Amino acid sequence: MSRLFRRGAPGRKRTGGTAARRADTVDDLTRTHLQDFVASRRGVEAFVEAPTTMNKTSLLLIAHDGEWTRRTVTSQRWGREFAKAAQIPVYEAGVVGYPQRMRDWNSRQKD
């Protein structure tokens, strides 16, 4: 293989460049935000969003009136476990889609 196509400088070890963290943890700020949203609103449902080429795995929480919040989470499993612990229904967003009340809430916010 040509030296032009090798990755990194010769003799140097590659490092991740960022502090490592466990793949199954979510930072406290994210966890607290999600817990507060569930506690302060009624009829909250969770929608786990699978990762795409543009976005990481995320958890979307939607209240009874369509108000919503979305946060990046470490895995789909983490999202399902969060919903189970919070005792709220959880759905796969790619399978069931999003409820109309979310779109209605977004429309009301634009007015």
Image (cartoon, rainbow, N blue to C red):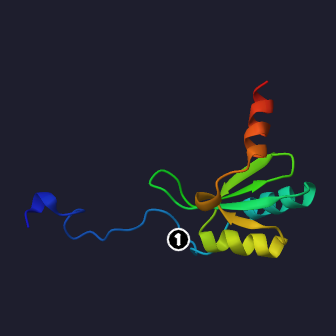
Helix, strand or loop status at disc 1 = loop
Q: Residues within 10 Å of mark 1 (few under 14, many from 20)?
A: few
Q: Which quadrant would residue 9 be assigned to in this image?
A: bottom left
Q: Nearer the viewer, residue 110 or 16?
A: 110
Q: Compared with residue 91, is residue 81 higher up or lower down, i.e. above or below? A: below
Q: Nearer the viewer, residue 21 or 60?
A: 60
Q: What residue is at 72 percent from the left and 40 percent from the top?
A: 103
Residue matched to label 1: 20
| In this picture, residue 2 sits left or right of residue 40 | left
- Name the residue furthest left: 2
User: Visible in this render: residue 48?
Assistant: yes
- Name the residue furthest top: 111
Q: Nearer the viewer, residue 71 or 61?
A: 61
Where does the N terminus fall, quadrant-wise? bottom left
Badge 1 amino acid: Ala
Q: What residue is at 42 percent from the left and 66 percent from the top?
A: 16
